Image (cartoon, rainbow, N blue to C red):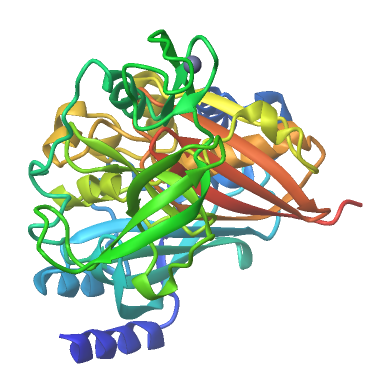
Amino acid sequence: MHDQLMALAEELTAAGESPASACPDPVNAAMIRNWTQALGDRGDRWAETAPPAMIQVWSMPGLDRDKPASIADRALTLLNESGFTGVVATNCEQTYDRYLRHGERLRATMRFGGVTGPKRTGLGEGYFVTWYQAWYSGDERVAEMMFRVLKFRPRVGGAAKGRHPLRPAVGLDTRFFWDGVREGELRVQRCAECGRLRHPPGPMCPSCHATKRDHVAASGRGTLHSYVVHHHPPVPGHEPPFVVALVDLEEGVRMVGNLLDCPPDQVRVGMPVELVFQEMDDELTLPQWRPAGAPAAPVSGASASAASASRASASAASASASKAAPESAAEVAGGLPGLSVELTPTFVISTALATRDFTPVHHDTALARAQGSKDIFLNILTTIGLVQRCVLEGLPDAVLEGISVRLGVPAYAGDTLTMTGRAVDDRTVEVRGAVSLGDHAVATVRLKERT
Ligand code: ZN
């Protein structure tokens, strides 16, 4: 299959740019108003031009039954037939040559960008498939987009499937800890008399023997105190070898958890680690660790076609250290005010429709759940729009030249999306969008030189 896939990729790439149909509507105020209202964007900014992050909206086929096939379809079909049935979008990069004016009529083109793989990823072995879309006004290119998905072979019998066989024993002394995990918080027990922290939790303070206790939420940052690499015996629900870490939390207590996203030969005592929440099944989430600042496993997507895709993505979710509070962002150099968006079902659905994305996982809860998702979730076009909103609320005079997004965990209805931005230099802003499961999107926004 590999050789066949590579030959196909070569053929598709060699075919170059293929014309797609004309965009159904000219750039118009009504669609822009729907979009700005749904996303909570300031509409008055767009009296003459269109929001650049709306570019893909103009060519979305919507509910058109005769929508043109994607240029990547043959490659994706071949992968499907070869068992790579999972799919998640991993990257989207948009380049804006200029802003569009109301009334402009666009046409779109597509070209194939290649296949790389097989690669081992957090979701399973897979191939990355890339394609490009470009938009033209007359003969002038006005924008381009790169889109990359991971087609993966869902792991069978892995931790992401079925009920995880090992459950923690939850008692009166430990319930607060597991309640915290469910809320995306790592809680450390504190003596309510002398204030000393202790872990594991217990009924009595070893210092002052008081039984009154409460807890604090840990930052999720720590360093590796010690570790073992487990090869044998087999542990139900875990695939050896895996790294069991003893972590010194910055609060001063020690905690055991698995170290994820780090090959055993790269583990070092003293390395900085950060908390991640690993969803073992629908009910059980475990606090685990990964190297601080390591890229999150690629996840989420517009198309949760494989039932296991979003389940697996949720289990690869990483979190918490990245769950930066918006107020802390403004304190760092170049920090933008940031956004906090309540992902109500109305928000998720109205933004999907305002971006002309009628994929059921963005509006049909029952269907989303039947496909293995926790709930309906935000579509990518909206995520990109919110990245734009975050930048322009912090830097109202900025003109966007492009947005590159690395996609992370899904942003489910019921969650809160916290977007923080930081100006790296005059022309670059980094935006991070976090939800309770971890990073939903990490974006680099390029700005045009200010004139
Ligand atoms: Zn005490």
Residue drawn at x 43%, y 13% as measured from the top left: 214
The foreground one among 235 and 155 is 235
Is residue 58 among what the camera can see?
no
**Image quarter (top left, top right, bottom left or bottom right) of the N terminus:** bottom left
The foreground one among 333 and 196 is 196
Residue 239 sits in which quadrant?
A: bottom left
The foreground one among 38 and 279 is 279
User: Where is residue 34 shown, x and y percent of the image?
Assistant: 51, 26
Q: Eyeballing the image, is 436 above or below 10? A: above
Taking 64 as reference, is 234 left or right?
Answer: left
User: Where is residue 419 shown, x and y percent of the image?
Assistant: 58, 35
Taking 292 as reference, is 73 left or right?
Answer: left
Is residue 252 among what the camera can see?
yes
Residue drawn at x 59%, y 41% as measured from the top left: 387
Taking 165 as reference, is 215 left or right?
Answer: right
Residue drawn at x 26%, y 91% as measured from the top left: 7
Residue drawn at x 9%, y 60% as measured from the top left: 156
User: Where is residue 251 shown, x and y percent of the image?
Assistant: 55, 35
User: Where is residue 110 shown, x and y percent of the image?
Assistant: 42, 68
Furthest residue toward right: 451
